Image (spheres, rainbow, N blue to C red):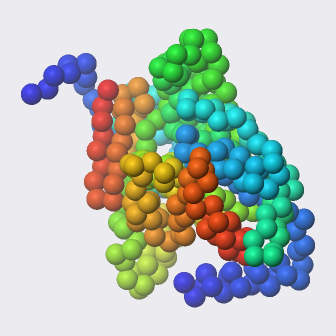
């Protein structure tokens, strides 16, 4: 039984990697943040590069100060555990990543005003809503 | 692995012949309230007798990067000089209302939130100016947060050596094994910055880390 009736609707925006693969870092971040500002949770096929993730955090911080009611984002990435990969798989994975980006992951990003918390452990991701 | 060993070896040889560092810039990174300033204070007190900054139970107490220059640490008759760079905790969200739960007035909470967002940006910018990093984690908390992974990912892409410190091992809820399992590729040292527990092992690990710079 659901006790909390505050959540009236939730939009999940699935984004295939091909939608951002040809964009520059700034454009990628803009595209994601635009959807998040629309109060939607983005489920991105693949993941951002580490420097893009930090850029996303920086841009988010700038927006907190400038957009009323915006409190930031919740972010989590689920990917195949590299420890389970053999050496050959790791080399193949590294080559594929360099060529087409890391697509064997799922990135979930949502506005902190809607997503209360994302709890991750190696095998599962729990998304707690407000 | 072989490439990494070769890379480290080349870097070390280059450093021996061409670089003479005056001091190693050692950054303290991690999520808010993990104990970065407490650890930096502990080191400063141990070796200089002074503290680097104020600590508090309210998150985002450190909202500007703080430094301590020329901190000489001795271990087994060897001495190394460090510039300690204590950074604000990195987070993906800041809500001033969270600060009001700590009895801060609305205006003060809003001011703190604004400063905290600027502090996070400052922390990220500083990633380009540190030689080695100590990631400070609260060992009573879940280590699998994306912020931790993002910080480490950025350090790896910049080829900056990393030591993971699991702080607060004096607390009953502390789970050092969980932290070590989350970061199998890194050396993890459990300490208590508050009580000073295991600081000898920590200094030994810092010297090992410095060799990778």
The quadrant in which the N terminus of chain A is found is top left
Task: Kindly identify the residue that appears in the image at 81 percent across and 76 percent down.
Answer: B77
Q: Is residue A116 visible?
A: yes
Left or right: where B7 falls relative to A12: right
Image coords of residue B24 (percent x, y): 80, 63
Q: Using the rendered view, name the quadrant where residue A9 is placed.
A: top left
| Camera-nearest residue between B132 and A77 | B132
Q: How many marks?
A: 0
Can residue A54 be spotted in the picture? no
Residue closest to the eye, B54 or A6 = B54
Q: Residue at x 50, y 33 (%)?
A: B93
Q: Is residue B43 above or below residue A85?
A: above
User: In this rendering, would A62 be left or right of B47?
Assistant: left
Instruction: Classify the position of the C terminus of chain A by image quarter.
Output: top left
> x, y percentage for residue B181?
40, 65
- Residue A15 position, x and y percent, is 37, 46
Q: Is residue A96 left or right of residue A8?
A: right
- The x and y percentages for residue A22 are 52, 54
Corner quadrant of residue B35: top right
Asked if B14 appears above or below B61 in the picture, the reply is below
Instruction: Identify the residue at image location x=66%, y=44%.
Output: B37
Which one is in front, A19 or A49? A49
Which residue sits furthest left?
A1
Residue at 80% from the left image edge and 44% from the top image edge: B50
Is B23 rendered above or below residue B105?
A: below
């Amino acid at each position: 039984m659901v006790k909390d009736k505050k959540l009236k609707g939730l939009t999940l925006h699935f984004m295939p990697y091909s939608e951002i693969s040809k964009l520059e870092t700034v454009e990628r971040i803009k595209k994601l943040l635009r959807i998040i500002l629309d109060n939607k949770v983005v489920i991105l096929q693949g993941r951002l590069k580490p420097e893009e993730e930090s850029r996303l955090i920086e841009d988010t911080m700038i927006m907190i100060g400038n957009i009323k009611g915006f409190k930031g984002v919740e972010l989590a990435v689920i990917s195949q555990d590299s420890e389970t990969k053999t050496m050959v798989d790791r080399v193949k994975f590294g080559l594929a990543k360099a060529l087409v980006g890391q697509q064997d992951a799922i990135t979930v990003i949502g506005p902190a005003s809607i997503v209360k918390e994302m709890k991750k452990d190696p095998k599962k991701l729990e998304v707690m809503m407000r | 692995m072989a490439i990494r060993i070769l890379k480290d070896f080349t870097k070390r040889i280059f450093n021996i012949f061409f670089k003479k560092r005056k001091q190693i810039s050692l950054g303290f990174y991690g999520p808010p309230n993990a104990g970065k300033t407490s650890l930096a204070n502990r080191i400063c007190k141990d070796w200089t007798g002074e503290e680097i900054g104020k600590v508090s139970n309210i998150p985002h107490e450190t909202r500007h990067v703080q430094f301590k220059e020329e901190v000489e640490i001795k271990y087994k008759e060897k001495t190394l000089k460090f510039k300690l760079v204590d950074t604000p905790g990195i987070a993906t969200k800041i809500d001033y209302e969270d600060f009001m739960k700590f009895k801060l007035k609305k205006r003060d909470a809003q001011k703190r939130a604004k400063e905290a967002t600027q502090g996070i940006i400052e922390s990220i910018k500083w990633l380009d100016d540190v030689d080695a990093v100590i990631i400070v984690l609260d060992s009573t908390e879940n280590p699998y947060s994306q912020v931790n992974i993002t910080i480490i990912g950025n350090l790896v892409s910049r080829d900056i050596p990393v030591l993971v410190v699991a702080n607060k091992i004096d607390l009953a809820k502390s789970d050092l094994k969980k932290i070590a399992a989350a970061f199998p590729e890194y050396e993890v040292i459990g300490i208590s910055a508050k009580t000073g527990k295991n600081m000898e092992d920590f200094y030994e690990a810092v010297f090992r880390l410095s060799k990778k710079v």
